Amino acid sequence: MSMDVSGGEMFFNGNIASSNGFSTYGSIYADGSIECYGDVFSQGTRLPRVYYGTSAPDDGDGEDGDIYIMYS
């Protein structure tokens, strides 16, 4: 399905689900949370994932550029 909403805005009161990816050439705004179970890219660059915990990260946690926040 393809829609052209260049003349205005589109609102959804329910969920948007895709089994084959979602792409946009504009911005995505959310008043709630956005959950992603894979990598997020912006202009071709993978954005860092954020991990947190009370112990030091293991070598297997994340990839180069990811953020790990330690708290007590």
Image (cartoon, rainbow, N blue to C red):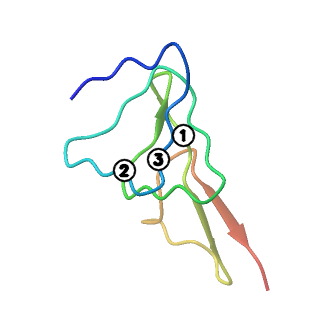
Q: Mark 3 and 2 residues: CB-CB less than 8 Å, in contact?
A: yes
Determine the CA span between mark 2 and mark 1: 22 Å
Task: Provide the residue designation for mark 2.
Answer: 16
Considering the image in quadrants, where does the N terminus appear? top left
Find residue 56 and report its horizontal and vertical position in percent: 63, 76
Q: Is residue 52 left or right of residue 63?
A: right
Mark toward the viewer: 2 or 1: 2
Task: Provide the residue designation for mark 3.
Answer: 12
Determine the CA span between mark 3 and mark 1: 26 Å
Find residue 26 and report its horizontal and vertical position in percent: 53, 22
Looking at the rendered structure, the secondary structure element under dot 1 is: loop
Q: Is residue 6 left or right of residue 17?
A: right
Write down the quadrant of residue 54 in the picture: bottom right
Report the amino acid beneath label 2: Ile
The mark found on residue 47 in the picture is 1
Mark toward the viewer: 3 or 2: 3
Q: Nearer the viewer, residue 36 or 27?
A: 27
Of pointers 2 and 1, the one earlier in the residue sequence: 2
Looking at the rendered structure, the secondary structure element under dot 3 is: loop
Q: Mark 3 and 1 residues: CB-CB less than 8 Å, in contact?
A: no
Determine the CA span between mark 3 and mark 2: 8 Å
Q: Is residue 63 left or right of residue 22?
A: right
At a point 26% along the width and 47% down the height, the residue shown is 18
